[in-house]
Amino acid sequence: MKLRLFCFPYAGGGASIFGNWKRKFPPEIKVCPVQLPGRESRALESPLNSLPDIVHSLVSEMTPFLHSPFAFFGHSMGALIAFETARKLYREHRVLPAHFFASGKAAPHCTSRKKILHRLPDDQFKDELRLIEGTPEEILDNDELMQIVMPRLRSDFAVCETYVYRPEEPLSCPITIFGGEQDHEVSIDSLRAWQEHTSSEFKLQLFEGNHFFLHQQETEVIDSMMHVLSSPKKPAVFRQHIAHVNGLG
């Protein structure tokens, strides 16, 4: 049975950031990039400005696929969306990912920001984007492109900055967390704090690179994920998942 790997992009990103992944994973793992409204193939749709709205939309879209095993991967904002989507799936359908991967994101209960970036004037907002090092300079220096990109980025930052964490029971699926050794946005302690959100196995792995080590170390990240998803424990994890979905009818 194939495993669907749902991949949630970071702020400002679309499904295309996972373009290489489909050919790098083996056939038994089906990479399913998540395309949020307002970007790439859904560019004509209005972006969703709150995490609950995004999660509600995603759970509706994923419901037809809950009868087969799946895993979640999310980077930065995508990790937060993946986490709340997993929690809502469990609340409403009593099903969880076979494995949950989060990357480049502090644990949900550690997400308070000192600065509210999405409300900054354009020049200050661009300065902050430069510090994060996720937007190419050729885009930051192009006023016409920034007029296109900036509303989406502001919307995504608003999603993260207005997020309110609400305590629930920890997920019962294994969690693996990835981080960048030179990521000044996310501390190792805040990555390690994800352990509080699982009652199953937990692993933290660091990679060389900044906040976007996901691209700098793409092959290494994918290799680590394949090792986890192809481990001898995988069948037991899948059996647990199937036991959950059998209750869906």
Image (cartoon, rainbow, N blue to C red):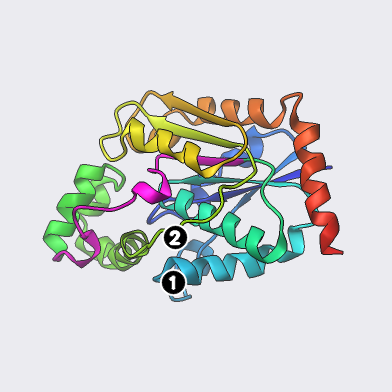
The relative height of residue 237 versus residue 171 in the rendered view (above or below) is above
| Horizontal side, residue 61 vs residue 176: left or right | right
For disc 2, the neighbor class at 10 Å (few under 14, some 14 to 19, many from 20) is few
Residue 117 percent coordinates (x, y): 22, 59
**Neighbour tally class for label 1: few under 14, some 14-19, many 20 plus, Cα within 10 Å:** some
Asked which secondary structure carries label 1, the reply is loop
Residue picked out by circle 1: 48
Q: Where residue 88 appears, x then y in whole percent?
A: 59, 62
What residue appears at the point 21 percent right and 60 percent down from the top-left corner? Answer: 116
Q: Which amino acid does label 2 sit on?
A: Arg
Q: Which sits in the foreground, 95 or 126?
A: 95
Which element carries disc 2, helix, strand or loop? loop
Over which residues does the magenta segment extend?
100-121
Quadrant of the drawing holding the C terminus: bottom right
**Residue 171 coordinates in the image, percent (x, y):** 59, 47
Residue 154 is one of the magenta-drawn residues: no
Quadrant (top left/top right/bottom left/bottom right) for the N terminus:
top right
Identify the residue shown where x is 25% and y is 48%.
138
| 16 to the left or right of 226 | left
- Position above or below: 183 against 4: above
Which residue position holds label 2?
166
In the image, what residue occupies the spot 72% across and 33% down? 26
* Residue 2 in sight in this render: no
Residue 153, located in which quarter of the rendered image? bottom left
Q: Is the residue under label 2 in contact with that under label 1 (CB below 8 Å)? A: no
Front position among marks 1 and 2? 2
Residue 150 locus on image (x, y percent)? 28, 64
Q: Which of marks 1 and 2 is nearer the N terminus?
A: 1
